[in-house]
Image (tube, rainbow, N blue to C red):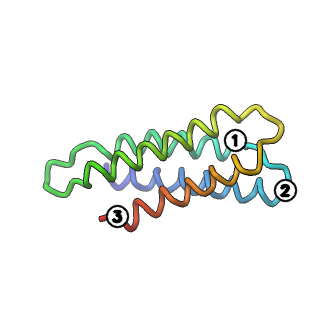
Amino acid sequence: MRLILLYAHLIGFALLLGGSITQYLTGTLRINSAMLWGAIVQVVTGIALSAPLRDGDEPPSAKLAVKAIIGLAIFAMAFFSRKREQVNRGHFLALVGLTLVNAAVAVFWK
């Protein structure tokens, strides 16, 4: 079950990052549905993945807290801006940057 959740989590990342790159290349910075759904999938599967494993291989609590805060910030930035025709460039780039930082935390923080 854990591998299925991890796979879904990676799909959420792909939706979020791919949707944002696609939107950036169009020249109109807005939150598209791929970005919103990617953020939703990331938060839901991230919460499910943070459940205790009970086999001694749990990730550090601080790492989970940092990832949760970043994930919720990404979701909030996408959700509350989803109906705007265009978002501020800084807002959009911060959303992409936080997505990349969240992935870096997952990969490099052991």
Residue 65: image quadrant is top left
Q: Residue at x 66, y 46 (%)?
A: 34
Q: Is residue 56 left or right of residue 1?
A: left
Q: Where is mark 3, residue-wise?
A: 109
Q: Is residue 58 left or right of residue 92?
A: left
Q: Residue at x 62, y 50 (%)?
A: 95
**Percent x, y of residue 17:** 62, 57
Q: How far is mark 1 from mark 3, CA to CA?
A: 30 Å
**Quarter of the image containing the C terminus?**
bottom left
> Is label 3 or label 2 in front?
3
Name the amino acid type tagged 3: Trp
Q: Residue at x 64, y 39 (%)?
A: 78
Q: Earlier in the sequence, mark 3 or mark 2?
A: 2
**Percent x, y of residue 33:** 69, 41
> Is label 1 or label 2 in front?
2
Name the amino acid type tagged 2: Thr
Q: Where is mark 1, residue-wise?
A: 33
Above or below residue 22? Residue 44 is above
Q: Is residue 56 left or right of residue 20?
A: left
User: Crowding near pointer 1: few (<14 within 10 Å), some, many (20+)?
Assistant: some
Label 2: element kind: helix
User: Crowding near pointer 2: few (<14 within 10 Å), some, many (20+)?
Assistant: few
Q: Residue at x 63, y 55 (%)?
A: 96
Q: Is residue 36 left or right of residue 1?
A: right
Q: Nearer the viewer, residue 19 or 107?
A: 107
Label 1: element kind: helix
**Percent x, y of residue 37:** 60, 41
* CB contact under 8 Å: marks 1 and 2: no
Q: Where is mark 2, residue-wise?
A: 26
Residue extending furthest front? Answer: 90
Label 3: element kind: loop
Q: Earlier in the sequence, mark 1 or mark 2?
A: 2
